[in-house]
Image (tube, rainbow, N blue to C red):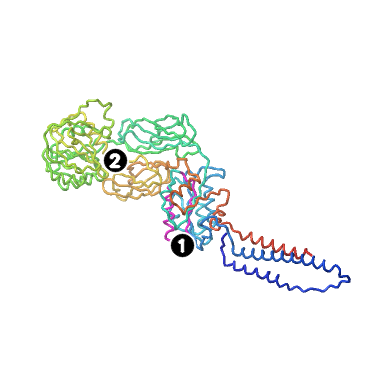
C-alpha cells in the first residue's frame, strides 16, 4: 500500500489525545450513602471490571477512528502497475483509432469501429480537462497533426469515418512520437485502439523509448468468411491492337469455409469480355486465366469482379493499360541505310520508322521515340553521346550495332558512363552462337517448342569487350568462347542492348537468321514504358508518364472516370519520363484518367489495400509476448473489456484507492463509540 499524500500521516500523533484522556480520567465521582454496606465490596469489584472494559473499548474505537481519518486524508492506494501515482499536472495523450475496413467487423457489442470511438472517448475522460490530446487515424490527415483540448478532441472524434487507408503499427507510433517529442512534458502516453491484424502489426519494428508510455487496446471481432481478389497480371507486358490477351487473376479464400462455383467476370471499358467460375478450399488460393482480344489501340479500363458477402470492399479489382497502335523507332546511321532494319521496321504498321544521318541529327526530337538504334556509326561525338545518355536514363531503349571500323575512344567515352563494356579489338575468327536466354522477355513467346539442336547464328567478325563493368548486365545470346553476341543492361529507367558484331552479312548470319525478326521486334515492343496496371490507395506511389508539357494555360490533372473528383497532382521528374504523386487525394478505388488540358494522356487504376483482407489478428496474450520479445518495457496491453476504460486507466495510474473505505471505517468506529456511551449503562 502506498500514499498519495503521505505527509498527512503525521496526523497519527493525534492518537495520543484519547490515550491521555484515558490515563488521566477527569471524571468526578459522587458519594453514595448505603444503609447496609455488606454488598459494597461485590458491587465495587463488578463495577470496576465493567468500567475498565468499557473504557478500553471506547479508547480502541477512538484510536481506530483517528487512524481511519488520517489514512483517508493521506489517500492510500494499492498499486497495480509501475505507472501508479505517475500522473503529473500536465499530460500529453495521443490516441490512435484504427478506421480501416477491418474495423467494420462485428462482435457482441456491435461494430468494432463504433467500439473504438467509444473507447477513445473513455480514454480522455480519465485525464484532466487541462491536458492536451491528439487524435490520429489511418488517414494521417493534417488536422490530426496537432494537440487539442478535450472538447476539440471529442469534436474531431465524432467526425472520423471508415477509410480505405491502412498503416503499419510502427508508422502510427512514429507519427504519434513526432508530435509529442517537441513538448517538454515528462508524462506522454500513446494509445492504440485496433483489432491488431497480423498483416499490419509490426511491434518488433518499434524502437524502445522510455519517454513515452504505450497502451494497446485490442478489439476482437467474430470471424467472417471472405473471398478476395488479390491481384492480376498479363502473360505479356506488350499490348498491341488486334492481339489476343491472357489475363491472370489471383483469388484467395480467407476463411475456413470452402466455396464452390463462385462467379467471376471481366469487363473492359464497360463491356463484359470474359466470365468463369471457380472453387476454393479453406484458406486456399487459385490463379484463374481469362482470355480476350484487344481489337484497337487506346486506353483500357478493366475490372475483375466477384460476388461475396458480408465483406465486399475486396470483391472488385481495377486495372488500366494502354494498347499501342505504333511504336516510334529512330535509326541513326552513317548515311547508308541498313536494308535489314528498314525492311523490318518500315513495312510494319506496328512501328513508326524514322532514320537520320549522324552528321545531321536533330537532338530535340529524341524524346519522341521509344527506341533508338545506333547502327554502324564510325564515331560517337560528345554531343550525340550526351543526348543518348540522357535518352536512356529517362526511360528510352537503345540498341547499339557497331561499325566494321570505329573510333574506339569515342565509343569508350560514350559507353563507360553508362557502366557498359566498351569495344576492344575486332576479331575475324569464326564463332557460333551456342545459347540464348529463353527466360528473358525478348525470347518469351518466340518459340512454340524448342528443338534439341537449335540452328543459331554464325559470327565471322566480332569485338572483344572490356568486361570490367558487368553490373546488371544479362547475356541474351552467347558465343562458344563465352563472349556475348547480344547483351542488355538496365540504365536507370532505360535499357541498352549491345550487339558485339556489325549488323551485316559479312560479319554474321544474324541479319538473315530466323531470330533476327523476333529479336528486333521484341526489343522495339519492350521499349514501350511498362506502366503499372494499378496503384494501391494510401501508398503514395509514383505514377510514371511520358513527359508532355501542357499547352498554353493547360495543366496536368487527374480526373475520376465515374465520379466528380478532379485535382492537380504533384509533378516530379525531368525530360523524357516524369512522375505524378497523388498524396492521399484519391480516397475511392476505381478508374482515373490523367489529362493534359483536355487531352487524355493515360489511364490509371487504384485499389484498396489487400492487407485488410487478411483475417488473422493477434490475441491479447500474443500482443503481450510480442511486446516482451521486442523489449517494449513501456508497453501495456489493456485487457478488461467489461470495465469502462476510464476506470481501467485510473486504476493503472492511481491503483485501487482506499480513502473511501477509511472514511466509512471512521464513521463506523465513531458510531460504535456513540452507541456504547449511550446504551452501555
- Residue 361 lies left or right of residue 320; in this view the side is left
- Depth check: give the residue in front, 177 or 561: 177
Q: CA distance from mark 2 to mark 1?
A: 53 Å
Q: Is residue 170 magenta?
A: yes
Q: Is residue 383 above or below residue 295?
A: below
The circle on residue 185 is 1
- Residue 95 lies left or right of residue 556; in this view the side is right
Structural crowding at the residue carrying mark 1, measured as other residues with C-alpha within 10 Å and reported as few (<14), some (14–19) or many (≥20): some
- Give the image location of residue 368, x and y in percent: 24, 43
Structural crowding at the residue carrying mark 2, measured as other residues with C-alpha within 10 Å and reported as few (<14), some (14–19) or many (≥20): many
Identify the mark nearer the N-term, 2 or 1.
Answer: 1
For disc 2, the marked residue is 529
Q: Quadrant of the N terminus?
A: bottom right
> Which quadrant of the view contains residue 658?
bottom right
Label 2 vs label 1, nearer the camera? 1
Q: Quadrant of the C terminus?
A: bottom right
- Provide the secondary structure element on which disc 2 rests: loop
- Depth check: give the residue in front, 5 or 179: 5
Can residue 330 be seen in this snapshot? no
Q: Is residue 37 magenta?
A: no
- Give the image location of residue 454, x and y in percent: 22, 27
- Residue 657 lies left or right of residue 18; in this view the side is left
* Residue drawn at x 57%, y 52% as measured from the top left: 644
> Which quadrant of the view contains residue 24?
bottom right
- Give the image location of residue 17, x and y in percent: 67, 70
Cβ atoms under marks 2 and 1 closer than 8 Å: no
- Provide the secondary structure element on which disc 1 rests: loop
State which region is magenta. 168-197
Amino acid at each position: 500500500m502506498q500514499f498519495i499524500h503521505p505527509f498527512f500521516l503525521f496526523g497519527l500523533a493525534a492518537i495520543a489525545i484519547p490515550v491521555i484522556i484515558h490515563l488521566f480520567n477527569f471524571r468526578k465521582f459522587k458519594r453514595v450513602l448505603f444503609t447496609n454496606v455488606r454488598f459494597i465490596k461485590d458491587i465495587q469489584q463488578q463495577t470496576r471490571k465493567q468500567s475498565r472494559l468499557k473504557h478500553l473499548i471506547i479508547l480502541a474505537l477512538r484510536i481506530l477512528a483517528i487512524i481511519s481519518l488520517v489514512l483517508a486524508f493521506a489517500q492510500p492506494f494499492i498499486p497495480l502497475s509501475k505507472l501508479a501515482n505517475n500522473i503529473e499536472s500536465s499530460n500529453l495523450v495521443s490516441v490512435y483509432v484504427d478506421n480501416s475496413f477491418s474495423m467494420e467487423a462485428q462482435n457482441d457489442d456491435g461494430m468494432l469501429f463504433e467500439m473504438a470511438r467509444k473507447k477513445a472517448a473513455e480514454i480522455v475522460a480519465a485525464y484532466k480537462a487541462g491536458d492536451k490530446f491528439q487524435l490520429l487515424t489511418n488517414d494521417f490527415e493534417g488536422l490530426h497533426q496537432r494537440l487539442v483540448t478535450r472538447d476539440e478532441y471529442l469534436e474531431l472524434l465524432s467526425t472520423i469515418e471508415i477509410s480505405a487507408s491502412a498503416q503499419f503499427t510502427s508508422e502510427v507510433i512514429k507519427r504519434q512520437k513526432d508530435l509529442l517529442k517537441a513538448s517538454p512534458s515528462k508524462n506522454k502516453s500513446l494509445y492504440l485502439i485496433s483489432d491488431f491484424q497480423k498483416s499490419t502489426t509490426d511491434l518488433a519494428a518499434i524502437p524502445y523509448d522510455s519517454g513515452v508510455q504505450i497502451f494497446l487496446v485490442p478489439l476482437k471481432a467474430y470471424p467472417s468468411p471472405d473471398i478476395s481478389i488479390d491481384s492480376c497480371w498479363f502473360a505479356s507486358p506488350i499490348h498491341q491492337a488486334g492481339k489476343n490477351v491472357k489475363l491472370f487473376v489471383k483469388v484467395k479464400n480467407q476463411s475456413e469455409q470452402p466455396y464452390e462455383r463462385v462467379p467471376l467476370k471481366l469487363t473492359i471499358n464497360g463491356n463484359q469480355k470474359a466470365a468463369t467460375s471457380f472453387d476454393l478450399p479453406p484458406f486456399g488460393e487459385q490463379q484463374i486465366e481469362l482470355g480476350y482480344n484487344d481489337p484497337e489501340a487506346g486506353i483500357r479500363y478493366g475490372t475483375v469482379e466477384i460476388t461475396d458477402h458480408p465483406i465486399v470492399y475486396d470483391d472488385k479489382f481495377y486495372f488500366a493499360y494502354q494498347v499501342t497502335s505504333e511504336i516510334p523507332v529512330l535509326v541513326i546511321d552513317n548515311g547508308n541505310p541498313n536494308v535489314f532494319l528498314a525492311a523490318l521496321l518500315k513495312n510494319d504498321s506496328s512501328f513508326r520508322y524514322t532514320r537520320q544521318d549522324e552528321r545531321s541529327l536533330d537532338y530535340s526530337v529524341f524524346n519522341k521515340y521509344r527506341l533508338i538504334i545506333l547502327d554502324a556509326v564510325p564515331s560517337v561525338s560528345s554531343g550525340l553521346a550526351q543526348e543518348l545518355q540522357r535518352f536512356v536514363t529517362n526511360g528510352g531503349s537503345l540498341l547499339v550495332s557497331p561499325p566494321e571500323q570505329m573510333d574506339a575512344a569515342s565509343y569508350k567515352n560514350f559507353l563507360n558512363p553508362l557502366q557498359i563494356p566498351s569495344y576492344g579489338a575486332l576479331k575475324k575468327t569464326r564463332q557460333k552462337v551456342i545459347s540464348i536466354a529463353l527466360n528473358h522477355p525478348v525470347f518469351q513467346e518466340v518459340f512454340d517448342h524448342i528443338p534439341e539442336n537449335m540452328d543459331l547464328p554464325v559470327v565471322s567478325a566480332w569485338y572483344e569487350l572490356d568486361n570490367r563493368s558487368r553490373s546488371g548486365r544479362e547475356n541474351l545470346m552467347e558465343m562458344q568462347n563465352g563472349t556475348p553476341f547480344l547483351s542488355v543492361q538496365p540504365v536507370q529507367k532505360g535499357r541498352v542492348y549491345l550487339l558485339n558484331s556489325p549488323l551485316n552479312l559479312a560479319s554474321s548470319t544474324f541479319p538473315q537468321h530466323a531470330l533476327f525478326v523476333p529479336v528486333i521486334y521484341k526489343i522495339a515492343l519492350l521499349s514501350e514504358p511498362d506502366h503499372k496496371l494499378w496503384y494501391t490507395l494510401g501508398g503514395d506511389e509514383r505514377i510514371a508518364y511520358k513527359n508532355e508539357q501542357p499547352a498554353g494555360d493547360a495543366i496536368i490533372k487527374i480526373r475520376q472516370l465515374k465520379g466528380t473528383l478532379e485535382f492537380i497532382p504533384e509533378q516530379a521528374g525531368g525530360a523524357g519520363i516524369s512522375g505524378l504523386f497523388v498524396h492521399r487525394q484519391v480516397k475511392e478505388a476505381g478508374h482515373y484518367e490523367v489529362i493534359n488540358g483536355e487531352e487524355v494522356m493515360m489511364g490509371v487504376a487504384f485499389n484498396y489495400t489487400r492487407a485488410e483482407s487478411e483475417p488473422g489478428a493477434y490475441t491479447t496474450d500474443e500482443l503481450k509476448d510480442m511486446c516482451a520479445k521486442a523489449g517494449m518495457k513501456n508497453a501495456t496491453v489493456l485487457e478488461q473489456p467489461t470495465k469502462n476504460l476510464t476506470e481501467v486507466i485510473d486504476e493503472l495510474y492511481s491503483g485501487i484507492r482506499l480513502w473511501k473505505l477509511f472514511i466509512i471505517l471512521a464513521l463506523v468506529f465513531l458510531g460504535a463509540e456513540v452507541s456504547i456511551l449511550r446504551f452501555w449503562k
